[in-house]
Amino acid sequence: METEATLAQVDVSDLELVKQCQAGQTEAFDELVSRYRTRVFAMIYNMVHNEQDAWDLAQESFVKAWKSINRFRRHSSFYTWVYRIVMNVTIDWLRKKQIKGAGSEFDDSIQLKEIDPASRTVPKAEPLPHERMERNEIRAKIDNAIGQLSPEHRAVILMKEIEDMQYHEIAETLGCSIGTVMSRLFYARKKLQNLLRDVYENI
Amino acid sequence: MKTFEQKWTAWLDGQLSGKELVNFEASLPDKAAAEAERRAAKKLGALLKEQLGAQALTNEEFFSHQLRERIGRETASQDRHGGRSTWWTVRRLAWSGAASLAAFVICAVFVLRDRNPGEQSQYLTQILNARVDPAVSPNATISMFETKEDKVTVLWVEGLQSLPADYAAK
């Protein structure tokens, strides 16, 4: 009862929820998952470009977070801490996939576009067909360009540009120095600028 | 000490200030080109944000439900595995202890049965020890004849050069 009352409060901080998790309250972890599942999923999806893989990796990341929640010392934010787990899981997965060399990474994104059932069942409020096609083309180009970056460079550029994270937060998440983060950002931006110049110059 | 790449990145993101900013901008060979690069980087950032920032998780509640199930399963499995492991350790320890005790008892029985110290006299033991000592009598031979029923033992000694006074019959 006490837990339900506590969770019902809007302003329960992440760290308070972490404390409750560490006391064995799974409801508190459920609340943390609800807060971050969308961002975590989106981040992983942008790294791996496949919905099913992103789903599985997000699940795996949260399971790992639950298992090691007692080791979280609350020196950083919960989000930074969980992001570190997410990045480790995702980068490991990408490396293994690269080693296996199992086909093109972007086949799935192309399939998603082609098969997307929502375009047939929910035509209302969707963009016009030519707009949709154009958007899909842009998305495919971006995915392709990001796919040419190493997992570490991908992680840095996405955390900076999409998540608006600070250098020190990215460094903490990836377990590297701030200088390394800045260098990776430099090379990632240069490469993406070369690959996507015609896209962003024409929008 | 920052490298050029690090300073450039910090400059693009507006993270340079004060003397560091002035020095960096002064070191740029073509300020106009650098500004154009900065604008391009901003456009790239905006494009990425617009295109990649909207990826939604469909069926969020199912995601949480699946996660709860998985955590529940793994926790239960861990508990089961942990319990079995402890029990297995206790049982193994008990079996190891019992087996060790049994082995010890068997060895002790054999050793005690073979010893039987009452059958040989103190005197005989001393003579036999003398035989194996080549310094005392290098060519000595000793034969022993024993009849258990009569409780008689005959020692036939040859080549014994001397019998130490300690070994005389007491």
Image: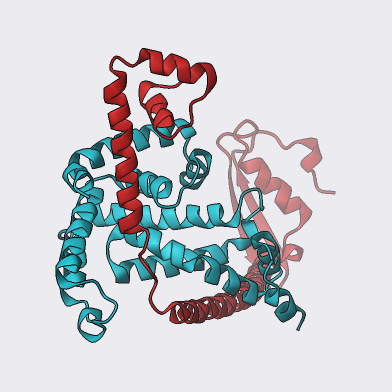
**Outermost bottom residue:** A121
**Can you see residue B149?**
no
Q: Is residue A155 above or below residue B98?
A: above
Would residue A17 be found to the left or right of residue B47 on screen? right
**Outermost right residue:** B170
Picture coordinates of residue B142 (x, y %)? 60, 48
By what rule are the colours in the image chosen? by chain
Q: Nearer the viewer, residue A203 or A22?
A: A203
Q: In which quarter of the view is residue A26 placed? A: bottom right
Q: In which quarter of the view is residue A31 placed? A: bottom right
Q: Is residue A116 above or below residue B111?
A: below
Q: Is residue B73 above or below residue B105?
A: below
Q: Nearer the viewer, residue B32 or B81?
A: B32
Q: Is residue A176 above or below residue A43?
A: above
Name the residue at 52% across, 76% down: B71
**Can you see residue A44?**
yes
- Please identify which colour was used for chain B in the image: red
Picture coordinates of residue A144 (x, y %)? 19, 53
Counting labels gives 0
Name the residue at 52% across, 79% down: B68
Q: In which quarter of the view is residue A47 placed? A: bottom left
Q: Nearer the viewer, residue B69 or B130?
A: B69
Q: Nearer the viewer, residue B67 or A131?
A: A131
- Please identify which colour was used for chain A in the image: cyan
Name the residue at 71% across, 69% down: A23
Picture coordinates of residue B80 (x, y %)? 57, 80
Would residue A123 be found to the left or right of residue B93 on screen? left
Picture coordinates of residue B83 (x, y %)? 62, 78
Name the residue at 49% across, 55% down: A83
Would residue B91 be found to the left or right of residue A155 on screen? right
